[in-house]
């Protein structure tokens, strides 16, 4: 964690400290009831079953979604705030030990962010409704309040994590660390599940046995879709891998041929990347790769196709881009990567890129021809000193012998 940016370290420590302070406060001031402990234990046991199902299916690397809020949201609505603050801790511990180990500070921060969001939702629900049994009575107002508290839980949790992500990478756009259409849909599903499970557990804890199988099935379906997506993704950079990029690129080229639109292909190579690995080690080299990949991704349109081609090379397909647009995009990538800095001990590593550009119907008519032309342009950029953009050199007609003339037609 200490290798991260100082603002991020301060933010993470602040959120965790606030969460611990809230746990201590409610532990000291709250009332202890064995019925609350029983409900909390039942919800945690259901969550543990879901985690075990996750372990058997596997979990994709990187950021992934689960449906565990179906169990800690009921803890926020049915139990005092202390239990909402504590609920994420056993779940994150089990995820770390049973599913996939990651850096510990991320698990700790996730627990704190979820706990604070759940604590806020719990405080609002209990202050508004008072008697939690009213939630299971079927009255509309307590259910509406529960939905509102679930929304509050989602908003606070997402905001806390988004601030951390943006602090780690200030150049990232807020839209990328907040919601997109898919994540919003998943949040709605989690919200509905959490409220339904809360009503079910409020009626009778034994009914959780009926709620558990559908939640497990939904979670397995969600993770299966994420694993399919992970099979298309380069693990280090999060971009498309070479095979997936080629399939997407072939589709775009066929479409461009059918519609007669322009299309450009870029090959991006990090200059002197071997020096970074040799000087600072492969872990820092991976951080440079990730930084370049994120920078490239952030400078492109949603429908541009970007992938990692292998090593320190990236490929970008620009639908509906002519030579002027391709040059402009390539120059923007070169400029933004040149301004990027990756911390390494007491140094800040900067790198440059060389870019080869090829245009469909000018330098080739299919993917193989475009890749070959862009690769030649990239080689030319490196020969000319790197940190620049090149197109394939125009074909030079054979020189005439002195005194020769064109044959008459």
Image (cartoon, rainbow, N blue to C red):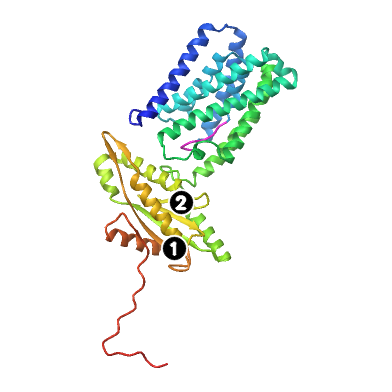
Q: Please state the horizontal and vertical placement of residue 234, each as a whole percent of the image.
A: 44, 45
Instruction: Give coordinates of residue 53: x percent, y percent.
Output: 56, 30
Asked if residue 330 shows in the view, the reply is: yes
Q: Is residue 217 visible?
A: no
Q: Is residue 71 rendered to the left or right of residue 242?
A: right
Q: CA distance from mark 1 to mark 2?
A: 18 Å
Q: Nearer the viewer, residue 35 or 112?
A: 112
The stretch of residues the image draws in magenta is: 60-66
Above/below status of 204 relative to 272 = above
The residue at 32%/42% (across/down) is: 285
- The kind of secondary structure element at disc 2 is strand
Q: How far across and how far down the image is residue 315, in percent?
A: 42, 54
Residue found 47% across the figure and 50% down from its top = 300
The correct choice, above or below, for 108 with respect to 357 in the image is: above
The quarter of the image holding the N terminus is top left
Q: Residues within 10 Å of mark 2 (few under 14, many from 20)?
A: many
Task: Give the image quarter of residue 35.
Answer: top right
């Amino acid at each position: 964690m200490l290798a991260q940016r100082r603002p991020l370290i301060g933010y993470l420590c602040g959120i965790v400290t606030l969460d611990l302070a809230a746990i201590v406060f409610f532990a000291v001031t709250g009332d202890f009831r064995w019925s609350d402990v029983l409900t909390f234990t039942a919800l945690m046991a259901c969550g543990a079953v879901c985690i075990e199902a996750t372990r058997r299916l596997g979990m994709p690397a990187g950021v992934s979604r689960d449906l565990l809020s179906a169990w800690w949201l009921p803890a926020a609505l049915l139990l005092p705030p202390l239990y909402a603050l504590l609920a994420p801790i056993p779940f994150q511990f089990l995820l770390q030990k049973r599913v996939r180990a990651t850096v510990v500070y991320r698990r700790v921060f996730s627990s704190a962010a979820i706990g604070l969001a759940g604590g806020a939702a719990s405080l609002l629900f209990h202050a508004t409704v008072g008697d939690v049994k009213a939630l299971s009575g079927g009255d509309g107002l307590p259910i509406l309040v529960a939905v509102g508290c679930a929304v509050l839980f989602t908003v606070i949790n997402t905001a806390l994590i988004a601030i951390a992500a943006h602090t780690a990478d200030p150049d990232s756009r807020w839209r990328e660390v907040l919601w997109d259409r898919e994540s919003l849909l998943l949040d709605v599903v989690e919200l509905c599940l959490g409220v339904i499970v809360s009503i079910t557990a409020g009626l009778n804890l034994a009914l959780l046995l009926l709620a558990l199988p559908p939640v497990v099935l939904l979670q397995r379906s969600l993770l299966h879709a994420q694993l399919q997506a992970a099979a298309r993704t380069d693990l280090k950079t999060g971009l498309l891998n070479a095979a997936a990029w080629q399939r997407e690129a072939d589709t775009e080229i066929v479409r461009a041929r059918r519609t007669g639109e322009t299309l450009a292909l870029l090959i991006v190579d990090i200059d002197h990347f071997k020096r970074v690995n040799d000087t600072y080690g492969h872990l820092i080299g991976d951080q440079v790769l990730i930084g370049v990949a994120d920078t490239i991704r952030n400078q492109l349109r949603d429908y541009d196709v970007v992938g990692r081609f292998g090593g320190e090379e990236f490929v970008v397909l620009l639908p509906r881009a002519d030579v002027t647009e391709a040059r402009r995009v390539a120059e923007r990538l070169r400029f933004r990567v040149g301004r990027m800095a990756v911390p390494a001990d007491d140094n800040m590593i900067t790198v440059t890129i060389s870019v080869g550009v090829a245009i469909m119907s000018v330098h080739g008519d299919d993917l193989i021809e475009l890749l070959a032309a862009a690769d030649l342009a990239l080689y030319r950029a490196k020969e000319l000193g790197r940190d620049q953009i090149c197109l394939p050199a125009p074909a030079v007609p054979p020189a005439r012998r002195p005194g020769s003339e064109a044959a008459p037609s």
